[in-house]
Image (cartoon, grey):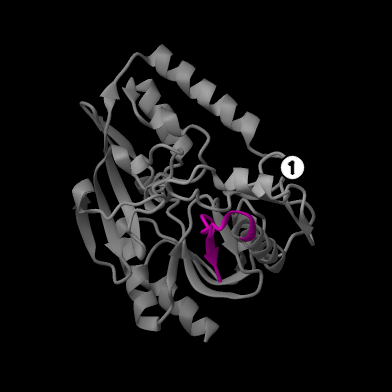
Amino acid sequence: MRIREERRFKRAFKGAVYFDRLLKDHTTFKIGGAVRVWIEPRSADDLKRALEICYEAGIKPFLIGRGSNLLVFDGRVDRAVIRLSAPCFKKVKFSGSYAICGGGLSLSAFIKRCIDSGLSGPERFAGIPGTVGGAVMMNAGTARDGICDLLAWIKVIDRRGRASVITREGLKLGYRDSGLSGSIILEAAFKLKKRERKALRREFKGRLKEKVKRQDYTAPNAGSIFKNPKGYKYTSGQMLEMSGLKGLRVGGAEISNKHANFIINTDGATFADVRTLMRKAKRAVKKNFGVSLQAEVKILK
């Protein structure tokens, strides 16, 4: 079976294909088992062919960016994981106040390119890890806004290899949700505003400094574990802290003493360690505040 799959994938397109690659080496949590197929397409046509093969073979594809905001099962993962690592997926071009960017570019690189071009908007998302495509997919952002607020349009491809262009008005946007589950973002266009470069750099550095000050970077983690409940007086982190959960540990996973909405991998944490800790945290907040926390971290198994 493995040999037939390998031949089929390698005949179909020009990009790289690997089997049984360990996902823990490609996630910021440093957790994750061997994936059935790992694909790095060389072009959009390559990506289309890979998706068609996955669809015909009954293999569910999953797009991975920089591996942040992701908790992966540490047994065998029966999926096709796709990474848009080729240069064609990382291009940026500017036209007036518009920035058009490939979905595979890191968000931090995109922000810096915009600042260098004197375009304002993305600097408010300083310190958010991942790619532009991943950020748009989950409508990443601050407590007040999301990156999709800046969108003009996106180009996506679905699991059957069909491409389409969607305007911002055509998206079903929500808190940490673009409504694009099942699609891969090839390209995104943002409507930005002109601003003086020095002011942009100053704001970017200030926001980055504040994020580093508040969040925990001492050990591998996936960023915020739970979404903030909409319209509630407390954030998830505040409720977790008031529930006395800082420092709570299961196996190698621990709720951060610096930020209670972070779970850190202190010593070889497993998928089960993190999931158990998440369940304990949810139960405590439900008991103390009557709020049902929803996971922000994406789970792949």
Where are the magenta residues, as a range? 287-301
Q: Is residue 289 magenta?
A: yes
Residue drawn at x 71%, y 46% as measured from the top left: 256
Is 31 left or right of 184, judged from the image as shown? right
The residue tagged 1 is: 257
Nearest the eye: 28 or 176: 176
Residue drawn at x 72%, y 64% as measured from the top left: 273
List the single residue furthest toward the bottom: 1
> Quadrant of the image for the C terminus?
bottom right
Residue drawn at x 35%, y 29% as measured from the top left: 121
Q: Image quarter for residue 190?
A: top left
Q: Main secondary structure of the magenta part?
A: loop
Relative to 139, does residue 279 appear above or below in the rendering?
below
Q: Position of residue 74 (x, y in %)?
A: 66, 69
Amino acid under disc 1: Asn
Q: Position of residue 221 (x, y in %)?
A: 65, 49
Relative to 77, does residue 259 appear above or below in the rendering?
above
Q: Position of residue 296 (x, y in %)?
A: 51, 55
